Amino acid sequence: MKNNKNNISRFPFFYGYIIIFTGTIGVLMSAPGQTVGISVFTDFIIDELKISRENLSLAYLIGTLVSSFFLTKAGRFFDRFGARVTSVLAAVFLGLSLFYLSEVSFLSGIISSFVGIEYWSAIVFILLSFGFLSTRFFGQGVLTMSSKNMVMKWFDKRRGMASAYMGIAISFGFSYSPRVFDWLISLFGWKGAWQVLALLVGIIFMLFAALSFRDNPFEFGLKPDGKEIIPKKKNVPIYHPEKDYTLKEVKATYSFWVFNLSLAMHALYGTAITFHIIDVFASAGLSRADAIMIFLPSSIVAVSFQLVSGYVADFIKMKYLLIVEIIGMMISMIALTFLSEGFPVILLILGNGIASGLFGVVSSVTWPRFYGLKNLGAITGFNMGWIVAGSAIGPYLFSLLYNINQNYSIPALLCFVATIILLLLSFKADNVNINKDQKI
């Protein structure tokens, strides 16, 4: 271990830049466990397993919601064992989860042969719920949290820029992943595609993480950002608090809940439209190709906003970025309410891009800046639990309300009302460490 430390500290440039790259790869490898990845497979699951869209959404809700309750414990595991151990284990179990999902039909057949074919629907529902629990927990939850937290630990005053650079690749990667998964399905079928992804994440990426992931710069005698950076301006943000907050102390602050609930709303709404994107466009008279095509232009908008927000995050209050994110959500919700060919689609792309671009920076930079690094895993794990819970509720809520009038305008309007409330609350969501006489 000593030689390893010396090698890292003697690297020709700051190893934190390698960490940005490896952390980005880590988040991208979670794509099969993200809604953007699973949504490509939903129609194939419905057709082969003979499950209704509403029941599929309910299985997704149960699996994802249950997984959210374990994320705070996963965060504490991260605090104790670090990014490398956490990410390696998450990769292995995500790979196993994807392989399991690819064999749900086979497993359902075996079980139904013993208990009776009349129980097929119940068996499929239970097996899918467990598969979604595992995939969402290790993908969207643990692997994403661990990879992002690792990068945040390696930077301090340049944390916003690190998040922006990371977010650029993630935005493009996630937006392009539906096409990649669609291509894999065309080559290997939907089951084979999941198995290929299982091998990629569970073996290849697992080895990559074991070799390149490092928890923090202090282990190697290095400083965050690579060196001490003295701000030139007087009125600059507080980059780290004087003390490290415990999760209990964090939950007692007003700002935490405003940021936390806003991020959870983003997950609820964003996951819902992504999960049902094909059906959302079909209900508006648009095609599957039209639905899948919106991800790329939306990612271009997201990257632009993420780059700008990552830069300005190092100089301004985080609540201003949260406000812009919320406005982006509102634009998207209005577009979804009146979705049709032309301008509403453009608005949907714009709103989703703005919100997604800001989400990456806000969800990464806020917690270490407000509450410190010592309990970062527990804090982000708790927040990630809310995000994952939101992503669980969204698809089922939209599916349930869709049955009322066969369009998605009602759930969009309900989300819009909730988002207005969050917008009003966000104006007072300041850094808890700021004194009353400070401007920033």
Image (cartoon, rainbow, N blue to C red):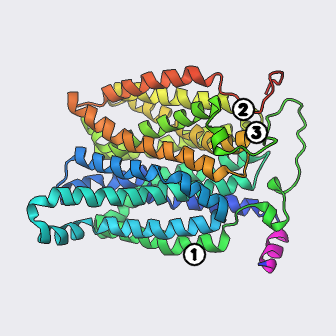
| Mark sitting earlier along the chain (1/3) | 1
* Label 3 close to label 2 by CB (< 8 Å): no
Amino acid on which the number 2 mark rests in the picture: Asn
Q: Say whether residue 14 is visible.
A: no
* Residue tagged 1: 207
Instruction: Judge by depth and name the residue closer to the eye, 340 or 78.
Output: 78
**Image coordinates for residue 121, horizontal then vertical, percent:** 16, 56
Between marks 3 and 2, how big is the CA–CA gap?
Answer: 13 Å
Instruction: Point out which mark residue 431 bears.
Output: 2
Numbered label attached to residue 314: 3
Is 10 inside the magenta-drawn segment? yes
Compared with 41, 253 (above or below) is above
- Classify 251 as above or below 97: above
| Distance from the alpha carbon under mark 1 to that under mark 3 | 34 Å
- Residue range in magenta is 2-12
In the structure shown, which secondary structural element does the residue marked by tag 2 occupy? loop
Q: Amino acid at mark 1?
A: Leu
In the rendered view of the protein, which quadrant contains the N terminus?
bottom right
